[in-house]
Image: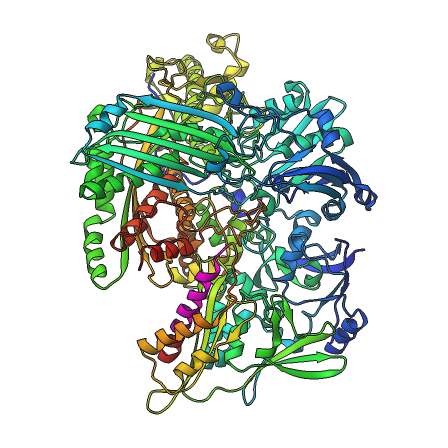
Amino acid sequence: MTGGETRYVGRPVPLLHGEQIVTGRRRFTADLTLPAMLHLAVVRSPHAHARLRGIDAADAVAEAGVVRVITGDEAARHIPQIPHRVDPALSGGRHADVLPLARTTVIYAGQPVAAVVAETLEAARQAAALVRVTYEPLPAVLDGDAAARPDAPRVIAEWPDNILHHGRIVHGDVAGAFASAAHRVEATIRLHRCSTQPLETRAYLAVHNAFDDLLTLYATTQNPHQLRHQLAGALRRPENRIRVIAPPLGGAFGLKMIGHPEESLVCLLAVLLQRPVRWVEDREECLIITGREQTHHVEVACRADGRVLAFRDRFVANVGAPYATPGWGMAPLTAATFPCGYDVQTVDIDYTLAVTHKGPWTASRGYGKEASNIVMERVMDLVAGRVGIDPVEVRRRNLIAASAFPYATATGLQIDSGDYQGTLAQLLELGEYDRWRAEQARRRAEGRWIGIGLACELTPEGGSLPRSLVAGYDTSTVRVDPSGEVTVLTGVTSPGGGNETGIAQIVADELGVPPWRIRVVQGDTDLCPYGFGNYSGRSLIAGGGSAALAARDVRQKMARVAAALLEAPIETLRFADGRIGVRDDPTRSAGFAEVAFAVYTRAYELAAVVEPPLEATRTYRPPAIRHTPDAHGRLNPYPTYSNAAYLAVAEVDPSTAVVRLLHFAASHDCGEAINPALVEGQLRGAIAMGIGAVLSEETRYAPDGARRTTSFREYVVPRVGDLPPIVIGHTRTPSPNTIFGNKGGGEAGVGGAAAAVMNAVADALAPLGVDVLSLPLTPPVVWRAIKGAGR
Amino acid sequence: MTAPVYHAPRSLAEALAVLQEFRGAGTVLAGGQDIVPLMNQGRLAPTHLVDIARLEELRNITEDAGLTIGALATHADLVRHGTIRSHLPLLVDAVRQMGGGLQVRNRGTIGGSLCAANPAYDLPACLLVLDAVLVLAGAAGVRRVSSSAFFLGAGRTVRRDDELLTAIEIPALPTGAGSAYVKLKFMEGGYTIAGAACVLVASANGTCREARLAVSGVSAVPRRISAAEAVLAGHRVTSETLAAVSAQIAGTITDPIEDVMAPADYRREMAGVMAARAVAEAAAR
Amino acid sequence: MTERIRLTVNGLLRDLDVDPRRALVHVLRDQLGLTGTHTGCLTGHCGACTVRLDGRAVKSCTVLAVSADGARVETIEGVLGDGALHPLQQAFWDRFGFQCGFCTPGMIMTALELLAEQPVPDHAAVREALSGNLCRCTGYHSIVDAVLAAAEAMQRLPERRPPR
């Protein structure tokens, strides 16, 4: 039998639910209401570190419309702790109990200390303001490097120090490489605290059906099944008596992974009060959550020609207060992603995760891998500068050669495929590198400060963690009704990037029906097969892959019945345009619906050859993921790796130190793209985030730890006028490890764009002798650096 | 925050009567661009909201000897007005460089902008260099206050809580005057870090007969910088005079704002940079 | 204590009792069930709550519902014509002018005002008009594209509805 024809995969099919979106009918979590619904408001600590001396809720309770006020002691009786999404203790780190409401001590500004439930949101907020909390403020530990010192004041009293986790990856003869090197390049590179801040904030709506003892939570979550598992642990209720439904998300970028205190708090109150309870996060609350602040002490040994021999890094990640989301997991992956796409087999990477009283980390787009790329790309430029060669040349000399794939990195990653030189070459042409260098010379002669920054980027995709519910596989069911309608139920979810359209395209090609006739169901733990949601660009790898396998099984069933119906050999059949027919014989065909109906109704004669009903559930487990250690004790958590290259041209205003981007180009290789328009759209969004991360976004604190970033006034994200024209090209080296050769998308762009902009600013200021090693590069920071260089 | 009592007076007299009756407890609401976000955040809890948006008579822009702008004229009204576009381009500059897009222009009023006295707002400095006079109406009658005396501090003006700002009177500029407002903000969504408003009147020989320069965003209140104006008066606008202007400005700002967006020393220097740019632009016009 | 207000919402007269603290966006969403208008910040920065009030684009989180008494309000739900998508809606869909779609209603409502004022805007005018609207997914490129494509499509169409 012939396979499905490719009509939709690889094409820019518009998003299937587009009509819903443009008419305002897309229902996000905060749009949902239930009868008798109550509203939750959270009382939060203004202090970063304080003892909780007492809570007086008398005035709050007395407010009209208030139904309940709950504090830490009562909450702890029901929820002893929130299970960690990935407990650091399971991989040699330390465990801290995370409670939904603080009991004796507050460890970050914004930490929930009480919650008010009322008939209206206004009443809840009004009452929340009346809850009198007595705090005894304590000094706050804010600096990660300082917190990592053995004598530092402790964030968690029970711990001997502030180290959440520590690890080290060593491979090759590091000392020997440094001893024999012509050059040793050293730098301390600082990355700052950011937050991905999707436009839709979090929201949770819980309802308990006492008759069936079923708790349902509608949640802005990337991982509904794992949220269900976590709630079962937190609420001590059976997992199969909890249903989590993830409505469409308004962006996620890691912030909506699980482990937030409000998730279980809303559920608890819905059970206690026997009425639905809804909480909608406001922006000030959303900005409590952060990511990414770390300091890298990097040393690179290289030859006189710029060929890097060894990479050494010692970094401290300031993960903020201990929290139950998997934010902390980013730092070990930063370590594992070094040295990115460069052929350097000798490494010594030492990483320390320090807890402080800053806002907790949650996953941030890139999940640590973007940080590796930023640091690595800055380092490569420093190497180029030291040995006196062009930044392009230093990369050419060090990138992994196309012939070297599959390539085992020093940290154990197995990079499946790529043509890094080709991507770089396309970028240079697309981005008109030579023309811009000439332009730079011309403008420099006029006294202008203009710089060109390059960055290569490696993005491991489809990640998994051993012995955890962070898996690399996923499962889909494809079902055809007796009337021939197709439904796909899948364990992957969408953060808003459109993967349900990609999945529909895949199934459409397998079954020969148009994608807009296919209903894709995601995010409901009662309806969908067990899955892992969205993260790490996995949805079309594992979700698309499993949907393809399930669709093929369904097609096979239908083909067998159609063969009987048409009295034709099965290998002559073709599925196209809603019909199943004999290739090259238009007189012999049957309708898709007709064959579907036959499967259901002729099970004892014509269709006896197949097992009804007409559905199949299949799992795709991408190969190449390695959870058993190799000879060096290393794992490979990713099945596939995308890559890209970026070019930024920046001009620094000598008077104001404002950085203006004049030009930006990218060349991106994600293997085969199921829907090129969706891939490119996500890349553009990621580039914008990377630019914002360098030029303006920053989460800040006062010296006592109080929050100073509480609205979009302080957390400045890019708007339409902040972005230069961005030229994008694609190269394509398919992955041998996924069904369609697709490598995943969604994270690529953040780290590479940030790195390119950082390098561009450094290049612009190089003639002044200014070192650019810290982010962000806001005008006051750049201004001070220029002053410091004596100009 | 308990629910406020909401008043929607139909006339200026009625509005003033309400403010008088609830003296000290009335919050004036016009476009709401300043007040409503604060209420949403729980940072402002008015007991009496006096909504003056229906006082259509306060929205007019009339031309007399100069120009009288009603306090409820929106930023969009300013940008659309022919005489403002041709004769007072600094006001157009200020509006076009505001953040917030079309929506804020449609809703935000000049009166609201002035009475909020937010150091980061742009129109106050423009009014200073226009020698604008603010008309305040109260139970005791109408009084006029020069714009330079109107602002007392961040969020504080001389308006008494039983008064309403009803109009801004702008004397006609001499012929041959050029004006500009130039500001620094970070990214499109940023608030003003430092801004400068300038009016220059040229003599026949190309020197400045008159120079007016005010700075915004740097101090708690916008200020005319007479020392910098003195540098320009009687001189041509050249790179030397511009440098002198910058230096004067930076020297005069003794209390620059330090906040999460920018440190004090940066702001001080940027005030000088923006001033020089505003002068250059005004000269070109 | 509530205030009684009257709004004309998408052409329909509605009498409502509203808390005077309540912003228009909450009345639209929670009292009228018009959840197409979204909240992203409640401080007037993000533009996701943009509606048209008496024909002008405003951020409905910055407008108290009581202030809007007597006004004509148009939300995204009112943009759909007689069964056919408005050219702006069609263009956003065709040109991938959204990913998650959360900012889209606000973008469309703002773009409607732009195109009413400037039927043939250039790139810079579109960028200026949308400067009050945040998007975190797309990087804005396809949004600007969609608005320009819609402008072009509207130029080609005969007058389909009375001017707003």
* Image point (33%, 91%), residue name: B205
Stretch in magenta? B261-278
Q: Is residue A264 visible?
A: yes
Residue A274 lies, in percent from the top left, at 77, 30
Q: Please, is residue B204 above or below residue B49 in the view?
A: below
Asked if residue A65 is positioned above or below residue C149 in the image, the reply reads above
Quadrant of the snapshot with the N terminus of chain C: bottom right
Left or right: residue A213 versus residue A466 is: right
Residue A524 or residue A571, whichever sits in front: A524
The image quadrant of residue A256 is top right
Residue found 52% across the figure and 40% down from its top: A290
Which of the two residues, A440 or A40, is positioned nearer the viewer here?
A440
Query: Where in the figure is residue B183, as x and y percent of width and height?
Result: 44, 67
Give the quarter of the figure containing the C terminus of chain C.
bottom right
Taking the spot 72% from the left edge, 25% from the top edge, the residue there is A78
Q: Is residue A373 rendered to the left or right of residue A285? A: left
> Is A567 situated above or below C36?
above
